[in-house]
Image (cartoon, coloured by chain):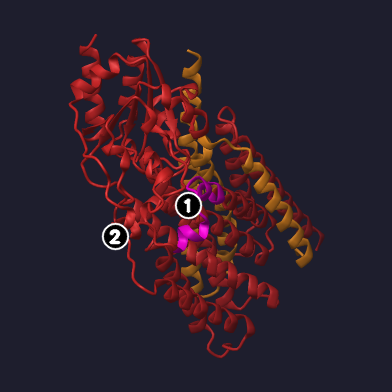
């Protein structure tokens, strides 16, 4: 059980962490980075799974099902496009030396 | 039950590890060299969290467990195949789409909580409601952003009093939220909660429809941050630390990115969201001078004999998929002994770094690519500035014409080059609908046509020139 004030501490520290981590990213990586952070909030998938697992009526199952489909799409799609973009930077970096 | 407590601890530890992997992964994405490993670290965290959640889904009925598996399979397969297929050019709208899905998932979690009335106390109830509201706004808003960038919606819907209508929708939604939380509408139950979500979805649509395509990167970034926040809120309700941490990290990172982008356009976020950008373009004044066309063969000869060339890519390059041809032309010019650089405006294309991704795809080395601060002084000594499908980011009106809607935005000083060649599809205005004073200058020549075709012609012309 996460207590209210503990949750506020988590919230504050995670907020500062996100700000600090991102503030050092060069402009050229902004698009993949936005995509990468978009992937990270795909963690909503575990919440949607829990919500669907506990559903006890048809209405809740329908909503929960939609939630899990959307969340899985967020996580998987976010990962695929981010990895594709970042791989290109690696290729371009190698050509520089040749 | 010590066994259950141990299992629960194991799950919580896995979530902690996942949160750490997300943060380390984002950190590694801050350098091009380690960036791919960064997304893989974050991916490992996601796999771990999902697998552990699945393994401990012990209370779920067989029906619910099967539904979870089926939903994951459907969502993953559809997203995997679409994500693998999408062209690099269309990345911005795909990010908007996946982001909207995350927001929708957060809203679905909130809906399940609110419909069952599982919330333990008023704090949980409030947080679930606010998170669900934000998630739903992000969901419908992101879908509109996707539709606009994909060209499914081409008009920006604007009318008088729009802001007040949006404000009214927001106030009604806030009132409905208050009813849900306070229990005033307890007897009404389901309809009030449903109505709250309907108003949230309508607000997302109404907020995004009037915003012009040129401002979409800022809007997508904002919705990215909002989805993160919604996920964090639902994580609090579900007692899930991984969701709180990951959601908040994305919320603050997205906020910072949004600020950086708005700043690059020299506008405040409020201005982007509420100013109905583009509406005042008619007041921008008529542009002096006429547009003077040039043939590709002449432009190619001019470039073949130039010492220093600066290429300014824009969205037109992305649309035409011309990045590979541009790199071919660049190599040709480098072989001729010319100095070639790429000048990238922070908001060129549809997203910060959009041009860098495309140039990276074509294999252009980093050291040829410069940002605005590095390159702007160089234009004065450049023989040719080759503008490929860029418009607002090279519009000198932003420096000098106070009545221009983009006055004050930092621009690339392409107009300072000795010669300017602009590759453009037609004589009309660009995406934002603003006239461009650069096109009428004495040293500017217009090369009309699709960027890929025009650059191919330039390659032929440079080759022919020897």
Residue depicted at 41% across the width and 51% down the height: B402
Horizontal side of residue B199 vs B44, given as left or right? left
Q: CA distance from mark 1 to mark 2?
A: 18 Å
Q: Which residue is label 2 attached to?
A: B155
Vertical position of residue B297 compared to residue B213: above or below = above
Q: Position of residue B386 (x, y in %)?
A: 33, 28
Please identify the quadrant where the N terminus of chain B is shown: bottom right
Q: Say whether residue B270 is magenta.
A: yes
Vertical position of residue B356 compared to residue B67: above or below = above
- Label 1 element class: helix
Tags 1 and 2 on a common chain: yes
Q: Work out whether residue A59 or residue B216 is closer to the camera in this orientation and state it.
A: B216
Q: Position of residue B32 (x, y in %)?
A: 55, 30
Report crowding for label 1: few under 14, some 14 to 19, many 20 or more residues within 10 A (C-alpha).
many
Magenta stretch: helix, strand or loop mostly: helix
Q: Say whether residue B216 is magenta.
A: no
Residue depicted at 37% across the width and 10% down the height: B337
The chain ID associated with circle 1 is B
Residue B239, image quadrant: bottom right
Q: Which residue is label 1 attached to?
A: B218
Of the two numbered discs 1 and 2 on the same chain, state the one appearing first in sequence.
2
Q: Work out whether residue B186 or residue B364 is closer to the camera in this orientation and state it.
A: B364
Q: How many marks?
A: 2
* Label placed on residue B5: none
Report crowding for label 2: few under 14, some 14 to 19, many 20 or more residues within 10 A (C-alpha).
few
Q: Colour of chain A?
A: orange
Start-end of magenta stretch: B258-274
Q: Position of residue B419 (x, y in %)?
A: 31, 26
Tell me the red chain: B
- Label 2 element class: loop
Q: Position of residue B213 (x, y in %)?
A: 36, 53
């Amino acid at each position: 059980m996460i207590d209210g004030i503990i949750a506020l501490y988590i919230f504050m520290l995670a907020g500062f962490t996100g700000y600090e981590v991102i503030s050092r990213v060069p402009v050229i990586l902004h698009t993949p980075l936005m995509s990468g952070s978009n992937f990270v909030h795909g963690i909503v998938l575990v919440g949607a799974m829990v919500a669907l697992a506990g559903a006890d009526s048809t209405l809740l199952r329908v909503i929960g099902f939609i939630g899990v489909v959307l969340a899985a799409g967020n996580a998987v799609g976010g990962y695929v496009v981010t990895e594709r973009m970042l791989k290109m930077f690696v290729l371009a970096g190698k050509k520089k030396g040749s | 039950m010590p066994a259950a407590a141990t299992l629960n601890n194991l799950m919580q530890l896995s979530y902690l590890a996942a949160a750490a992997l997300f943060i380390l992964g984002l950190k590694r994405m801050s350098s091009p060299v380690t960036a791919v490993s960064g997304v893989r670290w974050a991916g490992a965290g996601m796999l771990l969290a999902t697998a552990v959640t699945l393994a401990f889904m012990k209370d779920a009925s067989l029906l619910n467990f099967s539904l979870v598996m089926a939903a994951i399979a459907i969502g993953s397969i559809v997203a995997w195949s679409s994500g693998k297929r999408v062209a690099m050019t269309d990345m911005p709208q795909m990010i908007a789409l996946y982001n909207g899905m995350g927001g929708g998932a957060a809203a679905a979690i909130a809906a399940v909580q609110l419909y069952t009335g599982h919330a333990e106390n008023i704090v949980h109830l409030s947080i679930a409601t606010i998170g669900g509201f934000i998630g739903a706004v992000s969901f419908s808003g992101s879908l509109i952003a996707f539709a606009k960038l994909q060209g499914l919606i081409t008009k920006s819907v604007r009318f008088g009093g729009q802001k007040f209508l949006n404000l009214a929708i927001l106030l009604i939604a806030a009132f409905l939220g208050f009813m849900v939380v306070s229990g005033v509408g307890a007897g009404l139950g389901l309809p009030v909660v449903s109505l709250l979500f309907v108003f949230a979805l309508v607000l997302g649509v109404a907020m995004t429809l009037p915003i012009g395509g040129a401002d979409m990167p800022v809007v997508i970034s904002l919705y990215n941050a909002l989805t993160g926040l919604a996920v964090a809120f639902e994580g609090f309700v579900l007692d899930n630390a991984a969701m709180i941490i990951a959601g908040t990290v994305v919320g603050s990172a997205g906020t910072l990115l949004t600020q950086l982008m708005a700043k690059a356009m020299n506008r405040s976020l409020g201005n982007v969201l509420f100013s109905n950008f583009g509406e005042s373009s008619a007041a921008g004044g008529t542009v002096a001078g006429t547009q003077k066309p040039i043939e590709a063969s002449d432009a190619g000869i001019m470039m073949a004999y130039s010492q220093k060339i600066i290429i300014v890519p824009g969205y037109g390059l992305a649309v035409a998929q011309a990045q590979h041809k541009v790199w071919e032309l660049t190599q040709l010019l480098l072989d001729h002994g010319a100095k070639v650089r790429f000048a990238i405006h922070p908001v060129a294309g549809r997203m910060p770094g959009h041009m860098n991704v495309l140039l990276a795809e074509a294999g252009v080395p980093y050291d040829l690519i410069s940002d605005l601060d590095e390159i702007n002084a160089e234009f004065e000594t450049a023989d040719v500035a080759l503008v490929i499908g860029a418009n607002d980011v090279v519009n000198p009106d932003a420096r000098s014409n106070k009545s221009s809607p983009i006055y004050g935005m930092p621009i690339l000083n392409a107009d300072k080059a000795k010669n300017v060649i602009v590759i453009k599809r037609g004589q009309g205005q660009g995406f934002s609908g603003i006239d461009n004073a650069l096109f009428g200058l004495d040293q500017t020549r217009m090369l009309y046509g699709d960027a890929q075709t025009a650059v191919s012609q330039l390659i032929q012309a440079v080759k022919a020139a020897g």
